[in-house]
């Protein structure tokens, strides 16, 4: 579906792209059937998680009926979000085509608009069903995770060795190819720091060696931090001598906070473009448009060489859109600092919310340990005792892990990491998750008796 263009529109590539650089996170492709990607699914989950975490809806996740109802509501809401986002794309002018005579962008006809919406809706439902198929044990892991990892890996490979020239001055897209292309010029004047810096950093939004090195460093840091954990010694009450370890990872909530934070910022960017195009195109600072200029913000059109994207220029959207270039960060450090602060706070909020909503808090985990016949060595077998011990670790790693994830993701974006910092975080966590799933499957094949213990 990512290679099949939407029937009824011209090929739009990256021009007037409402999501732009966020495509890699939402596993979507401009102008194709996966125009919306996993955006509706993640947004629907985000809405329900916030409603549940704020107690606006009461859900008992220990009750199988409540869990099934919550999952069903998430699927239904995902379909409605697909319909809503498809309508927003059409009404927001994402598929407008310039009239060759007048040069004015015109929306598609009512018939074409309806046909485009039907294609987006059917494709969205197919993505939801593919994710559901994996969740029903017809495959490994989550469909959403698989889509994200594939998109990020594709972006990293293309930015590293992509052979296609995006401009007309023989500068290739891939960072490694461009580096070796420019190396002879630098070797002619090896003492020039300016020449070496021009090789490491190209600017203009093109992949460069600074981004390549940042990508490798971020990968190594995340892999190391993923291995950090506190292991609480436990024993099995029914069988004497059986001992084990209950791991509490540094990234206790995995990549959930960064997914929700990216979805939230992506929707601010997306909805802001729609409002700007339809109600505030001049971005005036007087009258009612002053508030539209402040919330969600104003946008500027990039040149065709840079992709023709609408980029926030001020307002809320400006401070929730990652500056993915070192030159942009140095040009406006206040914006970079505000963006990082907001992103980190969002990650912490979603981490704390997910711990409560996802049944990962100390109270729920202690109950699960006691119900499974486990106890912490050296302490009596009591839910309150186990909870007190877990309270030493779980709240702390939830907040600190959320802060660390936010700082790494934002910092990697500032240095131009390939696949974005958020994408790298997600990919490392997803690949490790698949490794653990395959290892578990292998163990249960060799030792069938461990299946009940591993779950």
Image (spheres, helix red, strand yellow):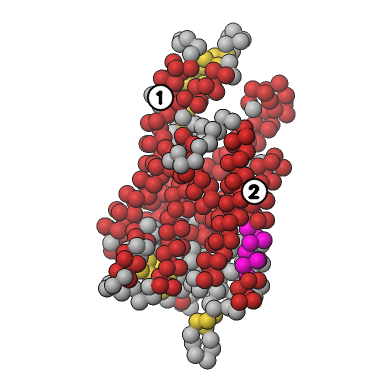
Q: Earlier in the sequence, mark 1 or mark 2?
A: 2
Vertical placement of residue 35 versus 253, above or below: below
Say which residue appears at 45% left-offset and 47% top-offset: 258
Q: Position of residue 315 (x, y in %)?
A: 32, 63
Q: Position of residue 147 (x, y in %)?
A: 60, 52
Residue 424 at least partly seen: no
Quarter of the view holding residue 199: bottom left
Residue indicated by mark 1: 391
Say which residue appears at 58% left-offset and 53% top-offset: 78
- Tell whether label 2 touches label 1 (CB within 8 Å): no
Say which residue appears at 64% left-offset and 76% top-offset: 111
Is 205 positioned to the left or the right of 365 in the image? left
Q: 147 or 419, which lies in front?
A: 147
Name the secondary structure under disc 1.
loop
Q: Residues within 10 Å of mark 1 (few under 14, many from 20)?
A: some
Q: Which mark is residue 455?
A: none
Say which residue appears at 65% left-offset and 66% top-offset: 118
Q: Position of residue 3 (x, y in %)?
A: 65, 65
Q: Which mark is residue 131?
A: 2
Tell me the quadrant of the picture where the C terminus can be found: top right
Vertical placement of residue 223 versus 248, above or below: below
Single out the residue that lies furthest toward the bottom: 101
Q: Residues within 10 Å of mark 2 (few under 14, many from 20)?
A: many
Tell me the quadrant of the picture where the N terminus can be found: bottom right
Question: What span is in magenta?
Answer: 116-124
Is 257 positioned to the left or the right of 63 in the image? left
């Amino acid at each position: 579906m990512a290679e099949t263009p939407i029937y009824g529109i011209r090929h739009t590539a990256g021009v007037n792209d409402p999501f732009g650089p966020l495509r890699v996170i939402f596993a979507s492709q401009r102008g194709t059937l996966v125009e919306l990607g996993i955006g509706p699914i993640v947004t629907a989950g985000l809405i329900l998680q916030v409603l549940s975490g704020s107690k606006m809806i009461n859900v008992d996740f220990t009750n199988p009926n409540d869990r099934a109802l919550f999952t069903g509501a998430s699927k239904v809401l995902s379909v409605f979000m697909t319909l809503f986002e498809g309508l927003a794309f059409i009404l927001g002018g994402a598929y407008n085509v310039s009239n060759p005579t007048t040069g004015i962008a015109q929306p598609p006809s009512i018939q074409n608009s309806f046909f485009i919406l039907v294609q987006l809706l059917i494709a969205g439902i197919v993505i939801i069903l593919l994710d559901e198929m994996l969740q029903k044990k017809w495959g490994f892991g989550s469909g959403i995770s698989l889509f994200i990892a594939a998109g990020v890996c594709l972006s990293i490979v293309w930015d590293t060795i992509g052979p296609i020239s995006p401009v007309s001055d023989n500068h290739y897209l891939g960072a490694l190819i461009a580096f070796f292309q420019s190396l002879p010029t630098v070797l002619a004047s090896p003492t020039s720091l300016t020449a070496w810096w021009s090789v490491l950093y190209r600017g203009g939004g093109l992949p460069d060696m600074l981004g390549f090195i940042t990508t490798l460093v971020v990968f190594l840091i995340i892999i190391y931090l993923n291995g950090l954990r506190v292991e609480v010694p436990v024993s099995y009450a029914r069988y004497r001598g059986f001992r084990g370890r209950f791991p509490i990872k540094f990234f206790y909530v995995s990549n959930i906070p960064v997914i929700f934070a990216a979805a939230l910022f992506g929707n601010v960017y997306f909805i802001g473009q729609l409002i700007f195009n339809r109600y505030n195109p001049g971005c005036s600072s007087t009258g009612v448009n002053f508030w539209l200029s402040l919330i969600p913000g104003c946008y500027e059109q990039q040149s065709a060489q840079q992709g023709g994207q609408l980029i926030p220029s001020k307002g809320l959207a400006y401070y929730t859109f990652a500056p993915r270039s070192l030159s942009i960060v140095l040009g406006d450090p206040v914006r970079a600092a505000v963006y990082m602060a907001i992103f980190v706070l969002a990650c912490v909020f979603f981490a704390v919310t997910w711990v409560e909503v996802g049944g990962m808090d100390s109270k729920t985990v202690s109950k699960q340990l006691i119900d499974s016949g486990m106890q912490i060595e050296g302490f009596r077998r009591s839910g309150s005792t186990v909870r007190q011990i877990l309270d030493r670790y779980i709240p702390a790693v939830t907040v600190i892990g959320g802060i660390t994830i936010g700082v790494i993701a934002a910092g990697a974006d500032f240095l131009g990491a390939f696949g974005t910092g958020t994408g790298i975080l997600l990919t490392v966590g997803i690949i490790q998750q698949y490794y653990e799933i395959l290892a578990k499957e292998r163990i249960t094949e060799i030792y069938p008796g461990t299946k009940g213990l591993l779950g």
